[in-house]
C-alpha cells in the first residue's frame, strides 16, 4: 500500500477524547499498510482566541509576532496526537513547519508555500515506519528564520502541499461534513453529496463561499494533481474498512469523472454591491487595503465620456471599501458612489457548461417566472453568477437546484 496524507480540522481535534479518536483513524490506515503523514489544525476555537489576544494586546500589531502567536495552536495538537498515537503502539513524531521545513514567502499571516521538504519524512517511513504528525497552517520564511502562517483555514493547504511533496496517492481531508454537496443542505434539503467533483468546479465552489476547504488548497491540488478526498471524521474509526470506498467526495481531474453532469452545484453568498461612476484606478487602493473584489461589471458608456462600474466585495469589507473609494475620490474623479448590502450572489457551476448551450437562459426564465429581479450577471467558462435581492436567496437557490435536476 502507498502513502496517504490525513488532515484533521479543528472540530476533529477539539479535545483529548477526539484526538484519541483521530489516533484510531490513523492506526487503521497504518495497519492496512499505508505510510502516513497527518496534518492537524488547532483545537476548534483556539486560533480565534489567539487572534483575539493579538488584537487586545494592540490593534495595530506586528504581523511577525501575530504569526508567532497564532502558529502555537497547531503545535499543541501535533504534540498531543503524537502522544496519543504512541500510547496505542504507533510510532509517531510531531513536526513544526520550520523543522521539515515548509518554506514560505514572507507575507506574514498570508504566506504562500514555496517548497516542502519531504525527505526526512519518507526516510522515516522506510526505516522506522514512523507516522509524521505535522502542524498545519504554519511554515518558515527561511531568509529571516521567522515563523509564518498561511491565512485562516490554511491547514488544508499544508495538507495538499505535503501530499505533493511525498507523492501521496491521496490526501484525505477529515472534517465535520461527509463531503461536498450540490448546495448548502441547510437551505435546500434536497441537496445531494457528490461522489466526484473536478478541481475547476471545486475551485469555483470554494471561491464562491462553500466553506469546506481553503481556496488555495484546491489551486495547489490542481497544479500538482493531488487527489483530495473530503470525508467525515465522526464515523467510528474501527467500523471503516480501509480497502472499501467510504462516503465522501473525491476532488480530482476532470478525466477521472466519467458521467458528466451539466451543472454540479450552486453556491451562494450574501454579499454587498458597490456602484461608483468610475475609472479603473479604483481597484488599486482597494487591493492595497487588502479588499477582495469580484464580480466586476462595467457597461459600455452611453455618452462616450462616462460609464458605470459595479462590483462586489465581502460583506465584512463593505464599509472599508466605501471608505477607500471615498478617500480616492479626487484621483478617480467619479460623480456618485452608491452601495447596497441587501444583495446576494448566486452562482451556478459545472464543467458541462462548456458543451451545453442555454444553461444560463433557462435560469433567467425560471427566476423571471418567480418574479426575481437580476441586478447583475457575470459568467466564466464553467460558471455564471447572478446578483439578486437578498430576500430571494433561498427561493432562487431552490428554484435553480430543481431546474438543473440536482434534487433527484
Ligand atoms: N487553525 C487555523 C485556523 O483556524 C488553520 C486551520 O484550521 O486550517 O484558521
Ligand atoms: Mg478548515
Image (cartoon, rainbow, N blue to C red):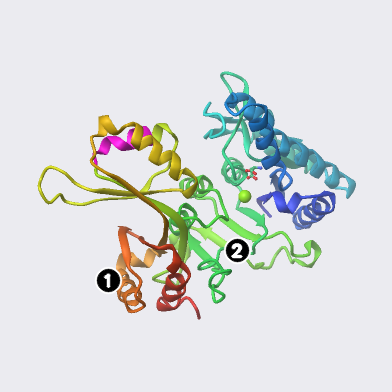
3D distance between C-alphas at marks 1 and 2: 29 Å
Residue span colored magenta: 278-286
User: Which quarter of the figure has residue 1?
Assistant: bottom right
Q: Is residue 260 magenta?
A: no
What SS does tag 2 mark?
Answer: loop
Residue 312, given in percent of the width and then of the height, sits at 38, 50
Q: Residue at x 50, y 48 (%)?
A: 215
Which of the two discs, 1 and 2, labels the residue nearer the N terminus? 2
Residue sitting farthest toward the top = 144
- Image height check: is 191 above or below 137? below
* Residue at the extreme bottom: 408
What residue do we see at 63% from left, 30% from top?
A: 67
Q: Position of residue 356 (x, y in %)?
A: 30, 71
Classify mark 2: residues with Cα within 10 Å, few (<14), some (14-19) or many (20+): many
Which image quadrant is residue 342 in? bottom left
Q: Is residue 34 visible in this depiction of the protein? A: no
Which residue lies at the image location 45% right of the left edge and 66% below the top edge? 391
Whether residue 238 is visible here, answered yes or no, is: yes
Label 1 Cα neighbours within 10 Å, binned few <14 / some 14-19 / many ≥20: few
Q: Which residue is mark 2?
A: 179
To which quarter of the image does residue 326 belong? top left
Res. 70 mark? none
User: Which residue in the protein does label 1 denote?
Assistant: 357
Helix, strand or loop status at disc 1 = loop
Q: Position of residue 201 (x, y in %)?
A: 44, 59
Amino acid at each position: 500500500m502507498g502513502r496517504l496524507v490525513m488532515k484533521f480540522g479543528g472540530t476533529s481535534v477539539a479535545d483529548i477524547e477526539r484526538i484519541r479518536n483521530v489516533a484510531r483513524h490513523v492506526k487503521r490506515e497504518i495497519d492496512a499498510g499505508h505510510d502516513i503523514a497527518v496534518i492537524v489544525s488547532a483545537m476548534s476555537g483556539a486560533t480565534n482566541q489567539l487572534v483575539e489576544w493579538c488584537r487586545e494586546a494592540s490593534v495595530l500589531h506586528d504581523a511577525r509576532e501575530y504569526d508567532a502567536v497564532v502558529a502555537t495552536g497547531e503545535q499543541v495538537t501535533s504534540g498531543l496526537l503524537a502522544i496519543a498515537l504512541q500510547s496505542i503502539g504507533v510510532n509517531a513524531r510531531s513536526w513544526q513547519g520550520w523543522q521539515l521545513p515548509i518554506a514560505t514567502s514572507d507575507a506574514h499571516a498570508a504566506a504562500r508555500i514555496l517548497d516542502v521538504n519531504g525527505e526526512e519524512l519518507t526516510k522515516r517511513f522506510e526505516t522506522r515506519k514512523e507516522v509524521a504528525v505535522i502542524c498545519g497552517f504554519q511554515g518558515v520564511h527561511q531568509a529571516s528564520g521567522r515563523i509564518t502562517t498561511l491565512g485562516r483555514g490554511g491547514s488544508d493547504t499544508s495538507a495538499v502541499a505535503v501530499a505533493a511533496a511525498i507523492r501521496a496517492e491521496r490526501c484525505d481531508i477529515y472534517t465535520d461534513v461527509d463531503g461536498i454537496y450540490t448546495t448548502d443542505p441547510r437551505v435546500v434539503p434536497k441537496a445531494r453529496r457528490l461522489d466526484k467533483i473536478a478541481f475547476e468546479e471545486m475551485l469555483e465552489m470554494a471561491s464562491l463561499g462553500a466553506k469546506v476547504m481553503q481556496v488555495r488548497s484546491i489551486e495547489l491540488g490542481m497544479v500538482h494533481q493531488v487527489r483530495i478526498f473530503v470525508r467525515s471524521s465522526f464515523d467510528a474509526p474501527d467500523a471503516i474498512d480501509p480497502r472499501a470506498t467510504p462516503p465522501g467526495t473525491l476532488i480530482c481531474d476532470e478525466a477521472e469523472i466519467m458521467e458528466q453532469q451539466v451543472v454540479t452545484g450552486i453556491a451562494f453568498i450574501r454579499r454587498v454591491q458597490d456602484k461608483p461612476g468610475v475609472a479603473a484606478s479604483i481597484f488599486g487602493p482597494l487591493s492595497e487595503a487588502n479588499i477582495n473584489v469580484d464580480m466586476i461589471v462595467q457597461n459600455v458608456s452611453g455618452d462616450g465620456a462616462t460609464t458605470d462600474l459595479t462590483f462586489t466585495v465581502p460583506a465584512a469589507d463593505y464599509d472599508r471599501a466605501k471608505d477607500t473609494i471615498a478617500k480616492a475620490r479626487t484621483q478617480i474623479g467619479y460623480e456618485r458612489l452608491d452601495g447596497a448590502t441587501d444583495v446576494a450572489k448566486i452562482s451556478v457551476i459545472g464543467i458541462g457548461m462548456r458543451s451545453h448551450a442555454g444553461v444560463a437562459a433557462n435560469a433567467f426564465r425560471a427566476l423571471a417566472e418567480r418574479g426575481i429581479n437580476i441586478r447583475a450577471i457575470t459568467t466564466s467558462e464553467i460558471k455564471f453568477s447572478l446578483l439578486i435581492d437578498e430576500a430571494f436567496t433561498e427561493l432562487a437557490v431552490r428554484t435553480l437546484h430543481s431546474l438543473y435536476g440536482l434534487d433527484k
